[in-house]
Amino acid sequence: GQNIDQPTEMTATEGAIVQINCTYQTSGFNGLFWYQQHAGEAPTFLSYNVLDGLEEKGRFSSFLSRSKGYSYLLLKELQMKDSASYLCAAHNAGNMLTFGGGTRLMVKP
Amino acid sequence: DAGVIQSPRHEVTEMGQEVTLRCKPISGHNSLFWYRQTMMRGLELLIYFNNNVPIDDSGMPEDRFSAKMPNASFSTLKIQPSEPRDSAVYFCASSLLAGDGQETQYFGPGTRLLVL
């Protein structure tokens, strides 16, 4: 079966760094997506990791370890607008995504 | 370039009524996905089409749900009869299955369904 785990909620301070972890157990794994979803809006694409290692994209970075079934999303220089839910999703060979429950991040001044 | 378009954006109906949700994928995309999102269950895949053909409908909750994709630019998700437990946000997403391994899915704005 498919199992994606991530923390339900996290709180961080404006200007700080936060790491959101995701562990997965899934068959036919292709890669790992991260999406951002603001309240009342649609998920929007942040990153996709296929190979092990860290991929940096501005203030956001994403890491994948295929052998450990583990990924994280790193957000630097946090801004108030980063308050949102962050969804990790495993991409399988059947071209489908299995989403975790999402991590609700609250950024405080 | 227009993104995924969904209609209606909001729907309030009474139990037992038929509900039809509509989706127009991004032009040129060949895969279309219907998801349901609730607080309790998160984002769940209902059905997935590739080149207008249903590939996986194992997420469709029961026979009350049906989905069609008559052409590359239009899909519907129908609930008949609707029940209060169907209340959720329904998202449509599309992607280009090109064999390059990424196939990023782009989501529409969603339809907020409330069944009374």
Image (spheres, coloured by chain):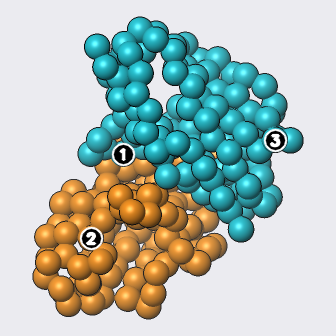
Which kind of residue does numbered mark 2 sit on?
Ser
Between B85 and A13, the one nearer to me in the picture: A13
Q: Is residue A104 above or below residue A89?
A: above
Identified at 30% across, 88% down, the residue is B80
* Gap in angstroms between the C-alphas marked 3 and 1: 30 Å
* Gap in angstroms between the C-alphas marked 2 and 3: 37 Å
Image disc number at residue B22: none
Mark 2 vs 3: CB contact within 8 A = no
Which kind of residue does numbered mark 3 sit on?
Lys
Res. A2 image quadrant: bottom right
Which label lies toward us, 3 or 1?
A: 3
What residue is shown with label 3? A68
> In the picture, which quadrant includes the C terminus of chain A?
top left
Q: Position of residue A14 (x, y in %)?
A: 37, 13
Q: Position of residue B82 (x, y in %)?
A: 26, 84
Pointer 2 indicates a residue of which chain?
Answer: B
Neighbor class of circle 1 (other Cα within 10 Å; few <14, some 14-19, many 20+) is many
Between A105 and B11, the one nearer to me in the picture: A105
Identified at 68% across, 45% down, the residue is A23
What residue is shown with label 1? A42
Q: Position of residue B6 (x, y in %)?
A: 31, 57
Q: Is residue B79 above or below residue A96?
A: below
Q: Residue furthest right?
A: A67
| Tags 2 and 3 on a common chain | no
* Gap in angstroms between the C-alphas marked 1 and 2: 17 Å
Q: Which chain is orange?
A: B
Secondary element at tag 3: loop
Which kind of residue does numbered mark 1 sit on?
Ala
Please tell me the colour of chain A.
Answer: cyan
What residue is shown with label 2? B87
Neighbor class of circle 2 (other Cα within 10 Å; few <14, some 14-19, many 20+) is some
Pointer 1 indicates a residue of which chain?
Answer: A
